[in-house]
Amino acid sequence: MRESAENQGSSRYPFAAYPSGWFRVAYADEVAAGEVKSLAYFGTKLVLFRSEEGEASVLDAYCPHLGADMGLGGRVEGKGIRCPFHDWHWDGGGRCLDIPYATRIPPKAATRSWPVCERNGVIFVYHDAPGRAPSYEIPELPQLASSDWRRPHIRHWKVRARWLDMNENCVDIAHFKYVHGTLTIPEARAEIDGHIFRTDSLFSWKTPGGEGHGTGHLVSTDHGPGFQTVELDGILDTLLMNTVTPIDAEHAEASFLYTVRTGGIEANEQLAKAVIQDLEQQFENDLPIWENKAYWTKPLLCDGDGPVPLYREWMQQFI
Ligand code: FES
Ligand SMILES: [Fe+2]
Protein backbone atom coordinates (compact mmCIF):
# COMPACT_ATOMS: atom_id res chain seq x y z
CA MET A 1 0.00 0.00 0.00
CA ARG A 2 0.90 3.65 -0.46
CA GLU A 3 1.93 4.20 3.15
CA SER A 4 3.51 0.84 3.94
CA ALA A 5 7.10 2.09 4.38
CA GLU A 6 6.13 4.98 6.61
CA ASN A 7 3.60 2.89 8.47
CA GLN A 8 6.34 0.70 9.91
CA GLY A 9 7.57 0.97 13.45
CA SER A 10 10.72 2.87 14.32
CA SER A 11 12.93 2.97 17.40
CA ARG A 12 10.84 5.77 18.90
CA TYR A 13 7.56 4.21 17.84
CA PRO A 14 7.74 0.43 17.38
CA PHE A 15 4.12 0.18 16.23
CA ALA A 16 2.12 1.22 13.16
CA ALA A 17 1.77 4.93 12.43
CA TYR A 18 -1.69 4.46 10.94
CA PRO A 19 -3.90 1.85 12.57
CA SER A 20 -7.28 0.69 11.25
CA GLY A 21 -10.37 2.49 12.44
CA TRP A 22 -12.58 5.57 12.28
CA PHE A 23 -10.76 8.89 12.66
CA ARG A 24 -12.04 12.46 12.86
CA VAL A 25 -10.93 14.60 9.94
CA ALA A 26 -13.20 17.60 10.58
CA TYR A 27 -16.09 18.86 12.64
CA ALA A 28 -19.27 18.90 10.57
CA ASP A 29 -19.62 22.68 10.65
CA GLU A 30 -16.16 23.19 9.16
CA VAL A 31 -17.45 22.41 5.66
CA ALA A 32 -20.79 23.70 4.37
CA ALA A 33 -22.72 22.35 1.36
CA GLY A 34 -20.77 23.16 -1.78
CA GLU A 35 -17.48 23.74 0.11
CA VAL A 36 -14.08 22.07 -0.13
CA LYS A 37 -11.55 21.54 2.67
CA SER A 38 -7.94 20.46 2.29
CA LEU A 39 -6.80 17.83 4.83
CA ALA A 40 -3.39 16.46 5.82
CA TYR A 41 -3.62 13.16 7.71
CA PHE A 42 -2.17 9.62 7.48
CA GLY A 43 1.02 10.99 5.90
CA THR A 44 -0.84 12.23 2.82
CA LYS A 45 -3.23 14.89 1.55
CA LEU A 46 -6.99 14.32 1.37
CA VAL A 47 -9.82 16.45 0.07
CA LEU A 48 -13.10 16.76 1.93
CA PHE A 49 -16.10 18.26 0.19
CA ARG A 50 -19.85 18.47 0.60
CA SER A 51 -22.05 18.02 -2.43
CA GLU A 52 -24.61 20.69 -3.18
CA GLU A 53 -27.13 18.42 -1.32
CA GLY A 54 -24.84 18.37 1.73
CA GLU A 55 -23.33 14.87 1.55
CA ALA A 56 -19.72 14.76 2.81
CA SER A 57 -17.11 12.82 0.82
CA VAL A 58 -13.37 12.34 1.21
CA LEU A 59 -11.02 11.48 -1.66
CA ASP A 60 -7.25 11.25 -2.01
CA ALA A 61 -6.33 14.86 -2.73
CA TYR A 62 -3.88 14.22 -5.56
CA CYS A 63 -5.78 13.90 -8.82
CA PRO A 64 -4.88 10.68 -10.69
CA HIS A 65 -4.62 12.66 -13.94
CA LEU A 66 -1.56 14.89 -13.46
CA GLY A 67 -1.44 15.14 -9.71
CA ALA A 68 -3.03 18.46 -8.71
CA ASP A 69 -4.11 18.80 -5.08
CA MET A 70 -7.88 19.04 -5.38
CA GLY A 71 -8.14 20.47 -1.87
CA LEU A 72 -6.51 23.66 -3.16
CA GLY A 73 -8.78 25.23 -5.76
CA GLY A 74 -11.09 22.28 -6.43
CA ARG A 75 -14.77 23.23 -6.68
CA VAL A 76 -17.95 21.33 -5.98
CA GLU A 77 -20.34 20.66 -8.82
CA GLY A 78 -23.45 18.57 -8.17
CA LYS A 79 -22.43 15.40 -6.30
CA GLY A 80 -18.75 15.74 -7.18
CA ILE A 81 -15.67 17.90 -7.31
CA ARG A 82 -13.92 19.47 -10.30
CA CYS A 83 -10.12 19.40 -10.26
CA PRO A 84 -8.56 22.89 -10.53
CA PHE A 85 -5.94 21.79 -13.10
CA HIS A 86 -7.87 20.35 -16.10
CA ASP A 87 -11.46 20.32 -14.77
CA TRP A 88 -11.95 16.56 -14.53
CA HIS A 89 -15.08 15.84 -12.50
CA TRP A 90 -14.93 13.22 -9.70
CA ASP A 91 -17.86 11.97 -7.64
CA GLY A 92 -17.74 11.11 -3.93
CA GLY A 93 -17.24 7.43 -4.75
CA GLY A 94 -14.06 8.25 -6.68
CA ARG A 95 -15.50 7.73 -10.18
CA CYS A 96 -14.68 10.09 -13.01
CA LEU A 97 -17.93 11.61 -14.29
CA ASP A 98 -16.62 13.93 -16.95
CA ILE A 99 -13.52 15.12 -18.79
CA PRO A 100 -14.65 18.25 -20.59
CA TYR A 101 -12.19 17.98 -23.49
CA ALA A 102 -12.07 14.17 -24.03
CA THR A 103 -14.23 12.05 -26.30
CA ARG A 104 -14.13 9.11 -23.88
CA ILE A 105 -13.33 8.64 -20.19
CA PRO A 106 -10.43 6.18 -19.72
CA PRO A 107 -11.95 2.93 -18.38
CA LYS A 108 -9.62 2.91 -15.34
CA ALA A 109 -10.35 6.51 -14.35
CA ALA A 110 -10.92 6.25 -10.62
CA THR A 111 -9.46 7.67 -7.44
CA ARG A 112 -9.50 6.50 -3.84
CA SER A 113 -12.67 7.30 -1.93
CA TRP A 114 -12.50 7.00 1.87
CA PRO A 115 -15.46 5.56 3.83
CA VAL A 116 -17.12 8.49 5.63
CA CYS A 117 -19.37 8.61 8.68
CA GLU A 118 -20.89 11.82 10.02
CA ARG A 119 -21.91 11.51 13.66
CA ASN A 120 -21.86 13.63 16.84
CA GLY A 121 -21.08 16.69 14.74
CA VAL A 122 -17.90 15.08 13.42
CA ILE A 123 -16.84 13.81 10.00
CA PHE A 124 -14.88 10.57 10.37
CA VAL A 125 -13.03 8.55 7.74
CA TYR A 126 -12.18 4.88 8.02
CA HIS A 127 -8.53 4.11 7.54
CA ASP A 128 -7.44 0.56 6.82
CA ALA A 129 -4.11 -0.06 5.11
CA PRO A 130 -5.26 -3.27 3.30
CA GLY A 131 -8.49 -1.52 2.25
CA ARG A 132 -10.96 -3.64 4.25
CA ALA A 133 -14.47 -2.32 4.94
CA PRO A 134 -15.26 -0.75 8.35
CA SER A 135 -15.59 -3.38 11.08
CA TYR A 136 -17.44 -1.30 13.70
CA GLU A 137 -19.52 1.87 14.09
CA ILE A 138 -19.11 5.11 16.01
CA PRO A 139 -21.85 5.39 18.68
CA GLU A 140 -24.26 8.33 18.88
CA LEU A 141 -23.73 10.41 22.06
CA PRO A 142 -27.17 11.49 23.35
CA GLN A 143 -25.61 14.13 25.64
CA LEU A 144 -24.70 16.22 22.60
CA ALA A 145 -28.35 16.60 21.63
CA SER A 146 -29.66 17.23 25.17
CA SER A 147 -30.52 20.70 26.48
CA ASP A 148 -29.38 19.52 29.96
CA TRP A 149 -25.80 19.62 28.71
CA ARG A 150 -24.05 22.90 27.99
CA ARG A 151 -22.81 23.93 24.57
CA PRO A 152 -19.62 21.93 23.87
CA HIS A 153 -16.20 23.50 24.13
CA ILE A 154 -13.62 22.18 21.64
CA ARG A 155 -9.81 22.28 21.67
CA HIS A 156 -7.22 21.03 19.17
CA TRP A 157 -3.58 20.20 19.82
CA LYS A 158 -0.91 19.11 17.35
CA VAL A 159 1.25 16.71 19.32
CA ARG A 160 4.68 15.33 18.45
CA ALA A 161 3.72 11.84 19.52
CA ARG A 162 2.23 8.74 18.00
CA TRP A 163 -1.44 7.94 18.73
CA LEU A 164 -0.84 4.97 21.07
CA ASP A 165 1.19 6.99 23.57
CA MET A 166 -1.81 9.30 23.99
CA ASN A 167 -4.48 6.60 23.84
CA GLU A 168 -3.08 4.44 26.60
CA ASN A 169 -3.01 7.39 28.99
CA CYS A 170 -6.44 6.56 30.42
CA VAL A 171 -5.39 3.07 31.50
CA ASP A 172 -2.09 4.27 32.98
CA ILE A 173 -3.69 4.81 36.37
CA ALA A 174 -0.58 5.65 38.40
CA HIS A 175 0.19 8.79 36.39
CA PHE A 176 -3.10 10.37 37.48
CA LYS A 177 -1.60 11.03 40.90
CA TYR A 178 1.81 12.23 39.77
CA VAL A 179 0.86 14.21 36.62
CA HIS A 180 -2.73 15.23 37.32
CA GLY A 181 -2.68 15.68 41.07
CA THR A 182 -5.39 13.22 42.08
CA LEU A 183 -5.19 12.41 45.77
CA THR A 184 -4.99 8.66 45.25
CA ILE A 185 -4.09 6.15 42.59
CA PRO A 186 -7.45 4.78 41.49
CA GLU A 187 -8.62 1.21 41.40
CA ALA A 188 -9.47 0.46 37.78
CA ARG A 189 -11.80 -2.15 36.37
CA ALA A 190 -11.30 -2.84 32.67
CA GLU A 191 -13.56 -4.73 30.30
CA ILE A 192 -13.35 -5.60 26.63
CA ASP A 193 -16.23 -6.02 24.21
CA GLY A 194 -14.80 -6.60 20.72
CA HIS A 195 -13.70 -3.21 19.39
CA ILE A 196 -14.61 -1.52 22.72
CA PHE A 197 -12.29 -1.12 25.73
CA ARG A 198 -13.83 0.38 28.86
CA THR A 199 -12.07 1.36 32.10
CA ASP A 200 -13.97 2.42 35.20
CA SER A 201 -11.74 4.10 37.80
CA LEU A 202 -12.68 5.54 41.20
CA PHE A 203 -10.78 8.76 41.94
CA SER A 204 -10.29 11.09 44.83
CA TRP A 205 -9.52 14.66 43.73
CA LYS A 206 -9.31 18.25 44.80
CA THR A 207 -12.25 20.44 43.80
CA PRO A 208 -11.20 22.70 40.89
CA GLY A 209 -10.54 26.21 42.16
CA GLY A 210 -11.46 25.25 45.72
CA GLU A 211 -10.06 23.77 48.91
CA GLY A 212 -12.43 20.80 49.13
CA HIS A 213 -12.04 17.34 47.71
CA GLY A 214 -14.36 14.68 46.47
CA THR A 215 -14.51 11.30 44.86
CA GLY A 216 -15.90 10.30 41.53
CA HIS A 217 -15.72 7.83 38.70
CA LEU A 218 -13.86 8.28 35.47
CA VAL A 219 -15.13 5.93 32.79
CA SER A 220 -13.14 5.94 29.58
CA THR A 221 -14.49 4.04 26.61
CA ASP A 222 -12.46 3.51 23.46
CA HIS A 223 -14.18 2.54 20.23
CA GLY A 224 -11.14 1.56 18.20
CA PRO A 225 -8.03 3.77 18.18
CA GLY A 226 -9.58 7.07 17.01
CA PHE A 227 -12.61 7.66 19.22
CA GLN A 228 -12.83 7.78 22.99
CA THR A 229 -15.37 9.09 25.47
CA VAL A 230 -14.51 9.98 29.06
CA GLU A 231 -17.36 10.35 31.53
CA LEU A 232 -16.72 11.89 34.95
CA ASP A 233 -19.06 12.29 37.89
CA GLY A 234 -18.49 13.54 41.42
CA ILE A 235 -18.60 17.30 40.75
CA LEU A 236 -20.82 17.92 37.75
CA ASP A 237 -21.40 15.14 35.23
CA THR A 238 -18.88 15.78 32.49
CA LEU A 239 -18.34 14.21 29.08
CA LEU A 240 -15.27 14.38 26.89
CA MET A 241 -15.30 13.19 23.30
CA ASN A 242 -11.65 12.65 22.43
CA THR A 243 -10.53 12.07 18.88
CA VAL A 244 -6.91 11.48 17.95
CA THR A 245 -5.95 11.38 14.26
CA PRO A 246 -2.45 10.59 12.94
CA ILE A 247 -1.03 13.44 10.84
CA ASP A 248 2.18 11.72 9.85
CA ALA A 249 4.57 9.18 11.34
CA GLU A 250 5.73 11.67 14.01
CA HIS A 251 2.65 13.75 14.81
CA ALA A 252 -1.00 13.36 15.75
CA GLU A 253 -3.84 15.82 16.11
CA ALA A 254 -5.83 15.50 19.30
CA SER A 255 -9.18 17.21 19.55
CA PHE A 256 -11.15 17.15 22.78
CA LEU A 257 -14.79 18.18 23.04
CA TYR A 258 -15.94 19.01 26.58
CA THR A 259 -19.50 19.27 27.80
CA VAL A 260 -21.01 19.40 31.29
CA ARG A 261 -24.51 18.65 32.53
CA THR A 262 -25.55 22.03 33.93
CA GLY A 263 -29.28 21.28 33.68
CA GLY A 264 -29.72 24.78 32.28
CA ILE A 265 -28.99 26.15 35.79
CA GLU A 266 -27.02 29.37 35.56
CA ALA A 267 -25.37 28.78 38.96
CA ASN A 268 -23.67 25.65 37.54
CA GLU A 269 -22.09 27.57 34.69
CA GLN A 270 -19.10 28.94 36.62
CA LEU A 271 -18.31 25.52 38.07
CA ALA A 272 -18.68 23.91 34.62
CA LYS A 273 -16.14 26.39 33.22
CA ALA A 274 -13.73 25.61 36.06
CA VAL A 275 -14.09 21.86 35.45
CA ILE A 276 -13.36 22.27 31.73
CA GLN A 277 -10.43 24.60 32.35
CA ASP A 278 -8.97 22.08 34.78
CA LEU A 279 -9.37 19.23 32.27
CA GLU A 280 -7.68 21.28 29.53
CA GLN A 281 -4.78 21.95 31.88
CA GLN A 282 -4.58 18.23 32.66
CA PHE A 283 -4.07 17.48 28.95
CA GLU A 284 -1.27 20.03 28.82
CA ASN A 285 0.39 18.42 31.83
CA ASP A 286 0.69 15.21 29.80
CA LEU A 287 2.06 16.90 26.66
CA PRO A 288 5.78 17.30 27.50
CA ILE A 289 5.94 13.70 28.67
CA TRP A 290 4.31 12.32 25.51
CA GLU A 291 6.46 14.47 23.23
CA ASN A 292 9.72 13.28 24.75
CA LYS A 293 9.12 9.74 25.94
CA ALA A 294 10.32 6.43 24.55
CA TYR A 295 7.85 3.63 23.91
CA TRP A 296 8.82 0.27 25.40
CA THR A 297 7.28 -2.78 23.81
CA LYS A 298 8.07 -4.67 27.01
CA PRO A 299 7.87 -2.03 29.76
CA LEU A 300 8.97 -2.73 33.34
CA LEU A 301 5.59 -2.74 35.08
CA CYS A 302 4.54 -3.27 38.71
CA ASP A 303 1.32 -4.57 40.27
CA GLY A 304 -0.11 -1.04 40.78
CA ASP A 305 0.13 -0.06 37.12
CA GLY A 306 -3.37 -1.01 36.00
CA PRO A 307 -4.53 -2.53 32.75
CA VAL A 308 -1.80 -1.25 30.40
CA PRO A 309 -0.86 -4.76 29.10
CA LEU A 310 -4.52 -5.68 28.55
CA TYR A 311 -5.06 -2.44 26.64
CA ARG A 312 -2.08 -3.08 24.39
CA GLU A 313 -3.26 -6.62 23.72
CA TRP A 314 -6.76 -5.32 22.78
CA MET A 315 -5.25 -2.67 20.52
CA GLN A 316 -3.45 -5.30 18.42
CA GLN A 317 -6.67 -5.90 16.43
CA PHE A 318 -6.29 -2.41 14.88
CA ILE A 319 -2.57 -2.48 14.09
S1 FES B 1 -4.56 17.04 -12.60
FE1 FES B 1 -6.64 16.94 -12.10
S2 FES B 1 -7.64 17.20 -13.98
FE2 FES B 1 -5.59 17.21 -14.48
FE1 LIG C 1 -2.85 11.98 31.49
Image (spheres, rainbow, N blue to C red):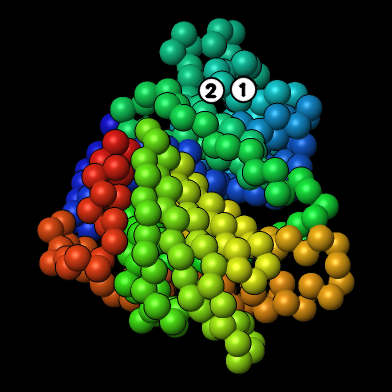
Vertical placement of 78 versus 204: above or below?
Answer: above
> Could you tell me which quadrant the N terminus lies in?
top left
Evaluate whether residue 139 shows in this view. yes
- Front residue of 72 and 245: 245
Amino acid type at image mark 1: Asp
Image quadrant where residue 211 sits = bottom right
Whether residue 68 can be seen here: no
Q: Are marks 1 and 2 in contact (CB under 8 Å)?
A: yes
Residue pictured at 72% horizontal, 49% vertical: 144
- Residue tagged by mark 2? 94
- How many numbered marks, from 0 up? 2
Q: Residue at x 87, y 72 (%)?
A: 266
- Which residue is rendered at x = 48% and y = 76% of the image? 204
Residue 55 as seen in the image, left or right of residue 46: right
Residue 156 in picture, x, y percent from top left: 56, 64
Q: Is residue 307 left or right of residue 180?
A: left
Pointer 2: residues within 10 angstroms few (<14), some, or many (20+)? many
Q: In which quadrant of the rendered view does residue 129 lie?
A: top left
Q: Secondary structure at mark 2?
A: loop
Q: Residues within 10 Å of mark 1 (few under 14, many from 20)?
A: many
Please tell me the numbered disc located at residue 91: 1
Q: Secondary structure at mark 1?
A: strand
Residue 298 image position (x, y, % from top left): 12, 58
Whether residue 298 sits left or right of residue 267 in the image: it is: left
Residue that extends furthest to the bottom in the rendered view of this protein: 211
Amino acid type of the residue that numbered disc 2 sits on in the rendered structure = Gly
Q: Assign the C terminus to one quadrant of the image.
A: top left
Residue 94 to residue 305: above or below: above
Quadrant in which ligand 2 is drawn:
bottom left
